[in-house]
Amino acid sequence: QEHRGVVSIDVGTSYSGFAYSIDGGPITAGFSGGTTVADRKIMTALLLRVDQSHAEQFGEGAIRNRKDDAFVDCALCENFKMRLFLDEDDVSRPVSRDDQRLSHREHQFEAIGQSGPESVPLFSIFVAALKYLRRAALEVPEIQACGDNITWVITIPAIWALPAKRFMRHAAEEANIGTSQSPDGDQSVLLCYEPEAASVHCFSDDSILGNMQAGVSILVVDCGGGTVDVTGHEIKSVDPLRLDSLVPHSGGPWGGSFIDAAFERCLLDLLQIFDAADREAFRYSDERLIIVSKWLEDKESFTGSQTVKVDVSGVNAWLVARGKTPPVLDEYIEVYNTERLAADASMHISKQGATRLKLPPALVMSFFDLVLNPIVAHVRDVLTENADVFDPCGGHPGLTTIFLVGGLSRSEILQQRMVEHFTIEPSGTHPGRVVTRAADPVMAVAFGACRVGMDPNTVVSRVSSRSYGIEGAMRKKNRIPAHNSDLAHIEVLGDRGPMVMNAFKMFINQGDVVDGQFEKIIPCCPQDEEHEHVTLRFYSAPHANPKLVNEPGCELLGTASVRFDMRIPDWRKRKVSVAIVPQGDQLVIQAFHDETDRRARLDLDFHFVFESEAMQEV
């Protein structure tokens, strides 16, 4: 008997995993056997054999074994996912648009080789990670039984720049994922936004199943290791489940790894491990893994009132083994408290016994506040700016539930803070709003992506986070805002008079709802007998209602050169219609000759933003 499978792959900043469903049955975690993160996923760390895009080790073993002689030609790669979003030298800000437009073969990542830092292609790292997870999935007997009859779903953060989507698609192809069509002609590989997958998963949550009706809406806050993504959906129909997006995807670099980094900086600074080589060596030591493992447990259960205790006895032994003098804790603690925390005695570190540090609640809370404050502020902004879709009115129930998903959602203090700020008790004017952790929050993205693979039409509309258009001409009387008037390129075109030649001719505005009914037709007409082609320049803008393509923030996405059919005798009938239509969560460009309805040739040069059909004339 032939079986059909759906496999979702979730490459996370801190942990990665996969999930699967066979013949539309229950969804199962690929790495199973327990309830902790480590039981359901594996650490996103790999030993890369660079010349082969091959992961010799994946998970905690990659860190433990990186100095093994068997892996002398390998480089250790961690935290690489964030390099598609954050700047290499300043992790507080996104990468520049110019960097995002680099070819996927040009992005470099500084990994750790046997003899020190080693620059390796970021593309090779992603390919190796996807290959490993694909191989792990195909070792599951139920998935093996499906043969080639598998739909693969790969998740990506919604707040990544547009080029990251094509980057991941190319990486999937290179990893031999979904390179052939499934038997019924459907796509065999899908890309799915992580918060969108999490939202689909949340609509199967027991807490909302009893209230499944058209008009019910939820907000999902996906708190991962690197980023936090926020999205909102409303039920359009229950059977089959169809969802409308309510707001553009949004978020920022506020994941759990930034809390961990603050904790480790504190520890290293207190122990006066300042030398770069020592810090690097400690990062990949067993002693650090022991401390971090205990810290991760404390991080989850921290409620704002506990003292966190850190046993540094292993660090003492590690320093002695490196020929260093072990720290005199009493002295080091006094120096750290005086120089770093003098302004607030409530944050002062103390000692318990000979080798145990006591981090007070106020100090630990300062680690969390680095991400909790921007998360709360952003969710508040989303609710305030979109009150018209989230507030109940006219029998519309509005936003009833805020779901927390992702690894960081297991944090007690995060849930406590979100409940405190966003819960609304039922009243005569409001049905109430609850904040809750989704069922199986660590696997929410992978499970939801599986559901998307089983029914790719679940989300029927999306709200655009940017404006899109082409460069064109418009009459000067269509006034340009005064602050941008000096950016306008004016030319006098015969009887038409002065024209703005760099106008932003918009076909999608920021905030527009794009669904299956959307279609934009751009007519292209030759100007004379000798006119063979016309070039369309596509732009996007981070704001609504752009007027000029060179306004601050606007970027050139690429060009499409439309070829006229010179075989048509009358040049006036060589008109070509360029159609922009949605296909899933991407835009597709097609071109047709009006006279013959044949596909027109498109020569495209895009920074992997638009999926396109560059068809030769038939």
Image: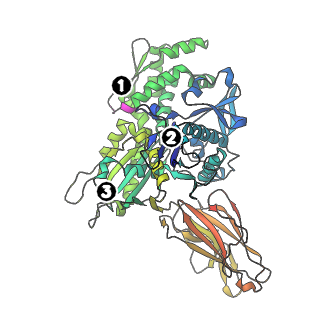
Confirm whether residue 304 shows in the render.
yes
Q: Is residue 303 magenta?
A: yes
x and y, in percent, of residue 253 in the image: 50, 44
Where is mark 2, residue-wise? 142
Magenta-drawn segment: 300-304
Q: In this view, does 516 lie above or below 319?
A: below
- In terms of sequence position, does the residue under pointer 1 or pointer 2 come before the other? 2
Tag 1, which secondary structure?
A: loop
The answer to whether mark 3 and mark 2 are in CB contact below 8 A is no
Residue positioned 41% across, 34% down in the render: 366
Cα distance between the residues tagged 1 and 3 = 42 Å
- In terms of sequence position, does the residue under pointer 3 or pointer 2 come before the other? 2
Q: How crowded is mark 2: few (under 14 residues within 10 Å), some or many (20 or more)?
A: some
Q: Is residue 66 above or below residue 211?
A: above
Q: Which residue lies furthest to the front in this view?
A: 1
Left/right placement of residue 575 relative to residue 9 reads right
Cα distance between the residues tagged 1 and 2 = 47 Å
x and y, in percent, of residue 511 in the image: 47, 64
The answer to whether mark 1 and mark 3 are in CB contact below 8 A is no
Name the colouring of the figure.
Answer: rainbow
Q: Nearer the viewer, residue 424 or 277?
A: 424
Where is mark 3, residue-wise? 212
Confirm whether residue 343 shows in the render.
no
Where is mark 1, residue-wise? 307
Q: Nearer the viewer, residue 371 or 134?
A: 134
**Disc 3 vs disc 2: which is toward the camera?**
2
From the image, give the main secondary structure of the stretch colored magenta: loop
- In terms of sequence position, does the residue under pointer 1 or pointer 3 come before the other? 3
Kind of residue sitting beneath label 2: Glu
